[in-house]
Amino acid sequence: MRKSYDVAVIGGGPCGAMAAERLGAMGYGVALIDPGNRIKPCGGAIPSRALADFGIPENQLVARANAARIIAPSGRTIDMTIGDIGYVGMVDRAGFDPYLRLRAVDAGAELLTAKLETITEGANGELALTLQPTGAEASNKPVTDIVVRRVIGADGANSAVRRLMFPSSRRPPYVFAYHEIVETPVDDIPDGFRADRCDVIYDGRISPDFYGWVFPHGKHISIGSGTAVKGHGIREATARLRQSAGLGDCRVIRREGAPLPLKPMRRWDNGRNVLLAGDAAGTVAPSSGEGIYYAMLCGRLAADAMHRSLASNSGKPLADARRTFMHAHGRVFFILGIMQTIWYRNDRLREKFVAMCADPDVQRLTWESYLNKKLVRRDPLAHLRVFAKDLAQLFGIPAGQR
């Protein structure tokens, strides 16, 4: 007899784990399904408020960054110091994701180490899932079939849930991200590298339409890049980035690559029994590529919408997840998307963008918006000043004519 659950959460990353934890704590029967055989390429940055919002203990941070260094194609650098309003916490997904999955299990979810193969919808609206076991003992385990009332697809940019249950046109645009985790030098620290600073590189040789990064991870460093341009040698670009950062001789711990969506889908649910969330729904911030905080938030919103759907025996409440997320963050995503479209097109504009980052108003509003996860509204004159400087940089207006 097939085992039954209220909800199957497909994907045990930050989004799926948070959804499973919340639903488990509500008393629902939850199957958290994750293959447990891959680590997403990720710079690992989360705002300090994430620790309070999601109950993350500080021992999950492998480093803290108090500043960012922005690097232009010419090599010009701009340091952006956060000050006393917070910090950027750094997590390593190799340990962070399993920690979140264990939290879900402690809350009552059942973790199944498997990957989703098929979904079949019955006449009564229930969903039959076929799961292929993964892991060290997978060859000795039979294919598993379970029956659920609802499914949350939190299984990444290449979501199997989206592929199986939504039209092929329902796919967000994405860049391909690749990074290498290397050992941090113990003795010979290269000039320019700091263990408390994130370096962000805007250079067409590294990425013709996104950016490269060098992020501290305590004993390790994440070095990577992203691009949507087919044919761009992203591995070669990352190798050049390692060399220019003085980290070319560091031992590589692991290499990872995956698509990174950059625009929320227009609809996340099928109106009946399936809801997408996190990367599967496209909730990675344009321009910055930030996704962990938004994924965890999506997980909670998906769980709350699923609770209302189950309680009312209706698929309509599933739309609440997207509606709530976009109400809180849609404007930020829209503005970041415009920024990426304008400033990331070529090195001439990237050079101007980096120059703009030297402005105190830009730095303050950037950090306050990032750390608070909302646009700063209390200083409208600063926004006007930044807007005027944006236009001046874009059209090359000299400072004396502004």
Image: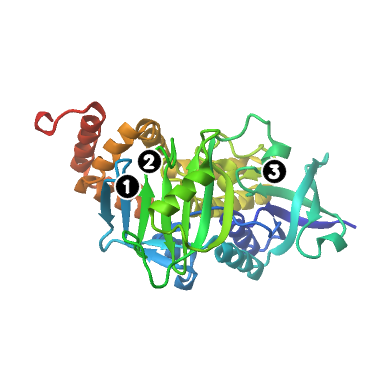
Query: Marks 2 and 3: CB-CB under 8 Å?
Result: no
Tell me, for residue 203, which label it has, or none: 2
**In the rendered image, is residue 268 in sight?**
yes
Task: Mark 3 vs mark 1: give the one in front.
Answer: 1
Measure the alpha-carbon separation of dots 3 and 1: 39 Å
Tell me, for residue 204, which label it has, or none: none
Residue at numbered disc 1:
71
The quadrant of the image that shows the N terminus is bottom right
Task: Give, as a three-letter code, the residue at label 3.
Answer: Val
Query: Marks 1 and 2: CB-CB under 8 Å?
Result: yes
Q: Secondary structure at mark 1?
A: strand
Task: Give, as a three-letter code, the residue at label 2.
Answer: Asp
Residue at numbered disc 3:
161
Residue at the location (74% across, 61% down)?
Answer: 112
Q: Earlier in the sequence, mark 2 or mark 3?
A: 3
Expressed as whole percent of the image width and height from the top left, the position of residue 368 reads 30, 52
Measure the alpha-carbon separation of dots 2 and 3: 36 Å
Farthest right residue in view:
1
Dot 2 crowding, Cα within 10 Å, few <14, some 14–19, many 20+:
many
55, 47: nearer the viewer? 47
Expressed as whole percent of the image width and height from the top left, the position of residue 374 reads 36, 48
Expressed as whole percent of the image width and height from the top left, the position of residue 362 reads 25, 45
Task: Mark 2 vs mark 3: give the one in front.
Answer: 2
221, 385: nearer the viewer? 221
Q: Secondary structure at mark 2?
A: loop
Task: Give, as a three-letter code, the residue at label 1.
Answer: Ile
Farthest front residue in view:
249
Residue at the location (20% across, 45% down)?
Answer: 359
Q: Earlier in the sequence, mark 1 or mark 2?
A: 1
In the picture shown, does residue 3 fall above or below 177? below
Asked which quadrant contains residue 85, the reply is bottom left
Dot 3 crowding, Cα within 10 Å, few <14, some 14–19, many 20+:
many
